[in-house]
Amino acid sequence: MLAIKHFCLERPRAVQALQACPAHHVSCARIGSLAGLALALVLAGQAPVSYAAGDIVAGKATFAQCASCHAVGPSARAGFGPQLNGLFGRPAAATPDYKYSAAMKNSGIVWSEKTLTAFLKAPSDVVPGTKMRFYGISDDKKIANLLAYLHTMQ
């Protein structure tokens, strides 16, 4: 908003020209609102920086390890593990077609990049008693790639 105010103060003729035309009567506040809306729309279409660095194709290859228990995509169903579509922002143990451990049900986790990264590194440390039998991924780049891929399944 400060930048818009600066624009209005530094370019009063531009603002006056807009205000002079009845069809385009625009105040600095209105310019600020429109600029804020435009910025929000631009940012809404952009990936968050943390997973944007991940390689989706490499993440799909990493997911091949996960696919023995988990599924993603339009026909995904629970198997040995829950399906992972729409994972980000979802509370842990929220998929109705999978029987979760009591530990996962009571974990209070909401899946985000931060919680998934911690869980993928050491599942049993994050949720002691989880049914997920996996030692974890220690490579941060592989995790970033996997998160990038999983974001395509939202």
Image (spheres, helix red, strand yellow):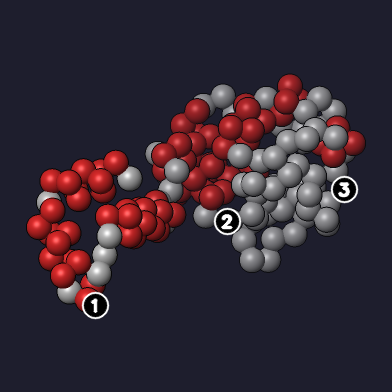
| Disc 2 element | loop
Residue at (12, 51) in percent of width and height:
11
Tell me the residue that label 1 is attached to: 23
In the visual, does 143 lie left or right of 68? left
Q: Tell which residue pokes out farthest to the top in this image.
A: 125
Q: Which residue is mark 2?
A: 153
In three-dimensional space, the C-alpha distance between marks 3 and 2, rounded to whole angstroms, equals 22 Å
**Rendered location of residue 32, percent (x, y):** 32, 53
Which amino acid type corresponds to the residue marked 2 in the rendered image? Answer: Met
Q: In the figure, is residue 58 to the left or right of 62?
A: left
Q: Which callout, 3 or 2, points at the residue further toward the start of the chain?
A: 3
Residue furthest to the right in view is 102
- Cα gap from disc 1 to disc 2, whole angstroms: 44 Å
Residue 9 locus on image (x, y percent): 17, 46
- Specify the amino acid type for callout 1: Ala
The three-letter code of the residue at mark 3 reads Lys
Instruction: Find numbered disc 3 in the image and state the secondary structure of the residue it sits on.
Output: loop
